[in-house]
Amino acid sequence: MVNSLRRSLVVGLPAAIALRPFAAAAQAPLRIEITEGVIEPMPFAAPGFVPDSAEAADLAARITQVVIDDLTGTGLFREIPSNAHIGRITNFDAPVQFADWKAINAQALITGAAGQRGDRVSVRFRLWDVFAQTQLGEGLQFEGTAQAWRRMGHKVADAVYSRLTGEGGYFDSRVAYIAASGPKSARRKQIAVMDYDGANPVMLTDGNALVLT
């Protein structure tokens, strides 16, 4: 499927996460196409990212879920649930058995791995066109602190979204808003920011400053 998707996107902030490409591959023309504003969501499979140790098992599962939630939340993608998977990804570098994923009608396949060493976390992923049996773009690796694990998931989703729509991703974005608390007669307003999906809210003012809305 060719052509790109036109959407209004939120501009993301620069990330304090290291990005490293680790494998080059030929581009393949798997793309979402919108006609007259109606689209059938693209079915994709995202088997759980492979942890490199028992310590990283929970991390890998949480990052996988962030990627899935980001993509399905757009309405452009439909996840094929894990209980429908025929194949299993237990080794990130093992050859992909495309027939297993084609059999469940997955058009795109996301494979990934996650590792944790103390306070440092790394995430790798690859995106595959199942029917063309090719890798879309090069594999990427993100590295950062354990506190940045959600951002790494958002960055994986951004890369997948960009490659499948032709537009920049917006999941690794921060949204500014006014948080109000207290009784109606004495509202306390603070400027805050949060992830695009409402996670990780941070207050930027203490409530004593004047906030006009």
Image: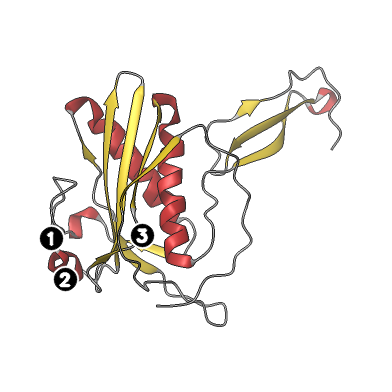
Q: Describe residue 65's horizontal placement relative to residue 49 as left or right.
A: right
Q: Mark 2 points at which residue?
A: 103
Q: How crowded is mark 3: few (under 14 residues within 10 Å), some or many (20 or more)?
A: some
Q: In terms of sequence position, does the residue under pointer 1 or pointer 3 come before the other?
A: 1
Report the residue at 13% width, 51% height from top.
94
Report the residue at 73% width, 18% height from top.
206
Quarter-of-image position of residue 201: top right
Q: Describe residue 43's horizontal placement relative to residue 88 as left or right.
A: right
Q: How many marks?
A: 3
| Marks 1 and 2, how far apart at CA | 8 Å
- Of 171 and 137, nearer the camera is 137
Q: Are marks 1 and 3 in contact (CB under 8 Å)?
A: no
Q: In this view, does 151 lie above or below 185?
A: below
Q: Which type of secondary structure does the marked residue at label 1 adopt? A: loop
Identify residue type, mark 1.
Answer: Ile
Q: In terms of sequence position, does the residue under pointer 1 or pointer 2 come before the other?
A: 1
Identify residue type, mark 3.
Answer: Gly
- Of 66 and 126, nearer the camera is 126
Q: Which type of secondary structure does the marked residue at label 3 adopt? A: loop
Q: Residues within 10 Å of mark 2 (few under 14, many from 20)?
A: few
* Camera sees residue 72: no
Q: Which type of secondary structure does the marked residue at label 2 adopt? A: loop
Between circles 1 and 3, the one closer to the viewer is 3
| Marks 1 and 3, how far apart at CA | 25 Å
Per the rendering, the mark at residue 86 is 1
Q: Mark 3 points at which residue?
A: 137
In the picture as drawn, the residue positioned furthest to the front comes out as: 24
Q: Do the residues labelled 1 and 2 touch (CB within 8 Å)?
A: yes
| Marks 3 and 2, how far apart at CA | 23 Å
